Image: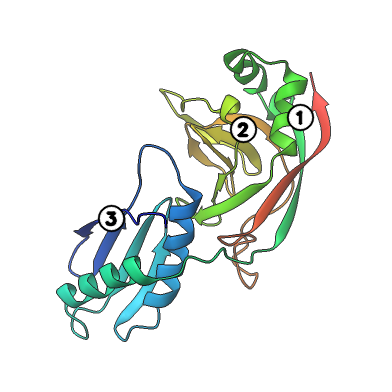
């Protein structure tokens, strides 16, 4: 039986508790437990919202309805007893134009990895990614499943404007920009798939547990 690692709990203001179970590397097993605990805690009276992150979980509650120490006890009990179950997410196809002016870091990432551009594109597009969390900005997906050789530390100086639809890599995670915003992640391509629309129900195109495949439309030199 796999040992359940004890998470760290911290108050985030008067009405929120952060459960942090992140280790040195991202764990899909821990993330599955995060999702299960988030779902269970939503059924507790006084819990307003559960927000899964990358190997962490924010619990938002009404302190007039439920005391913080009771939330902590319930959270710890759930963490130890819940049965992690992979979320039955949807399969999402993301067509990508790699390289060129809309994938300006593709060549430098290939150099960093010691691979050809074509090999980077092959490895990036053949992987199956899991949406570990949605956050940072509306609709932004943190994707696990990146080939470890494609991992690259984030830029020391973030760009002030990374365009909507940019397909990006930051550290050991892959992602897609749902809007134009500053980012220190590396841009390797562009997709036209809209990840966030406030008039759509639900507004975000992807949910935790969804599986993403990147499909090569073109590789620009």
Q: Gap between marks 1 and 2, in whole Å?
A: 10 Å
Q: Is residue 200 above or below residue 185?
A: below
Q: Is residue 97 left or right of residue 108?
A: right
Badge 1 vs badge 2, beta-carbon distance below 8 Å: no
Of pointers 3 and 2, the one earlier in the residue sequence: 3
Residue 25 vs residue 182, the one in the foreground:
25
Residue name at image x 46 percent, y 25 percent: 153
Of pointers 1 and 2, the one earlier in the residue sequence: 1
Q: Secondary structure at mark 1?
A: helix
Residue name at image x 55 percent, y 60 percent: 208
Residue 219: x and y in percent read: 81, 27
Number of the label disc, if any, that sits on residue 147: 2
Residue at the front extreme?
1
Which quarter of the rendering shows the N terminus?
Answer: bottom left
Q: Quadrant of residue 53?
A: bottom left
Instruction: From the image, state whether disc 3 or disc 1 is nearer to you.
Output: 3
Q: Which residue is mark 3?
A: 7
Residue 63 vs residue 158, the one in the foreground:
63
Q: Which residue is mark 1?
A: 122
Q: Is residue 100 left or right of residue 78?
A: right
């Amino acid at each position: 039986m796999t040992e359940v690692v004890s998470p760290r709990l911290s108050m985030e203001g008067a009405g929120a508790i952060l459960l942090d179970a992140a280790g040195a590397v991202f764990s899909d097993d821990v993330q599955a437990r995060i999702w299960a605990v988030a779902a269970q805690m939503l059924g507790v009276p006084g819990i307003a919202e559960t927000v899964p992150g990358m190997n962490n979980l924010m619990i938002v509650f009404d302190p007039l309805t439920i005391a913080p120490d009771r939330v902590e006890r319930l959270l710890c009990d759930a963490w130890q007893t819940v049965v992690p179950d992979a979320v039955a997410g949807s399969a999402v196809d993301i067509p990508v134009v790699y390289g060129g002016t809309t994938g300006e870091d593709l060549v430098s990432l290939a150099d960093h990895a010691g691979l050809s551009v074509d090999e980077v594109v092959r490895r990036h597009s053949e992987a199956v990614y899991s949406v570990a969390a949605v956050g940072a900005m509306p609709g932004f997906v943190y994707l696990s499943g990146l080939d470890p050789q494609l991992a690259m530390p984030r830029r020391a100086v973030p760009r002030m404007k990374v365009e909507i639809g940019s397909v990006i890599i930051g550290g050991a995670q892959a992602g897609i920009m749902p809007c134009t915003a500053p980012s220190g992640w590396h841009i390797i391509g562009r997709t036209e798939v809209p990840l966030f629309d406030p008039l759509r129900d639900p507004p975000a195109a992807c949910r935790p547990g969804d599986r993403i495949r990147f499909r090569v439309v073109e590789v620009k030199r």
